[in-house]
């Protein structure tokens, strides 16, 4: 895909129609399918290190990178760009206790699977909850990470 200078590491489809891609450089792009135009996000547009996971529901796009950072974006019209573009919702990246291996986003929940085999679940409509680090799910004992 033209627009990325490095290999794409993750892709999600926002609202079933807008591809969002992340590369090994940490760059995110949304794509206008009608024009094949790549749109750079407004606000925080690039993680410091390669993207490890992307997910989306009908309201937000979640990105994660290998440096334990997560960002939340929404889609908006941005002057000078064709179609909808990513806009960062938070003023800075969220730092978690481990790098994200994968996300699953539904309309109700965001499930985060970390590289240290821990899992966290958040209400999708409560971004502030994600800002709090609830720690690893120690209650799962030896079964932790086996879900």
Image (spheres, rainbow, N blue to C red):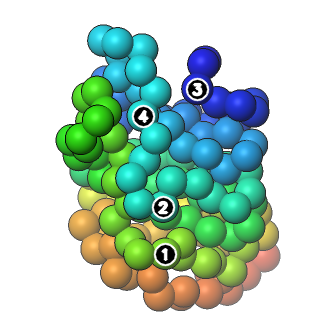
Query: 43 left or right of 59?
Result: right
Given residues 119 and 76, the one toward you in this image is: 76
Q: Which residue is mark 4?
A: 39
Q: Which residue is mark 3?
A: 3
The CA distance from mark 3 to mark 4 is 9 Å
Q: Which residue is mark 2?
A: 44
Q: Earlier in the sequence, mark 3 or mark 4?
A: 3
Asked which quadrant contains residue 131, the reply is bottom left
Please report contact status of discs 2 and 4: CB closer than 8 Å, yes or no: no
The C terminus lies in quadrant? bottom right
Please report contact status of discs 3 and 4: CB closer than 8 Å, yes or no: no
Structural crowding at the residue carrying mark 1, measured as other residues with C-alpha within 10 Å and reported as few (<14), some (14–19) or many (≥20): few
Looking at the rendered structure, the secondary structure element under dot 2 is: loop
The CA distance from mark 1 to mark 4 is 20 Å
> How far across and how far down the image is residue 13, in percent?
41, 31
Question: Is residue 19 visible in the rendered structure shown here?
Answer: no
Q: Residue at x 62, y 77 (%)?
A: 96
Structural crowding at the residue carrying mark 4, measured as other residues with C-alpha within 10 Å and reported as few (<14), some (14–19) or many (≥20): many
Given residues 66 and 85, the one toward you in this image is: 85
Q: Which residue is mark 1?
A: 92
Looking at the rendered structure, the secondary structure element under dot 1 is: loop
């Amino acid at each position: 895909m033209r627009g990325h200078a490095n290999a794409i590491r993750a892709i999600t489809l926002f609202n079933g129609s807008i591809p969002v891609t992340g590369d090994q450089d940490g760059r995110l792009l949304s794509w206008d399918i009608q024009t094949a135009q790549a749109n750079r996000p407004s606000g925080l547009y690039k993680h410091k290190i390669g993207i490890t996971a992307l997910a989306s529901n009908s309201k937000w796009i979640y990105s994660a990178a290998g440096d334990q950072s997560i960002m939340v974006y929404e889609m908006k019209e941005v002057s000078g760009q064709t179609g909808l573009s990513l806009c960062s919702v938070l003023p800075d990246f969220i730092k978690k206790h481990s790098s994200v291996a994968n996300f699953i986003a539904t309309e109700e929940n965001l499930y985060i699977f970390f590289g240290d085999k821990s899992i966290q679940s958040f209400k999708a409509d409560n971004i502030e909850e994600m800002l709090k680090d609830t720690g690893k799910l120690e209650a799962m004992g030896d079964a932790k990470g086996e879900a």
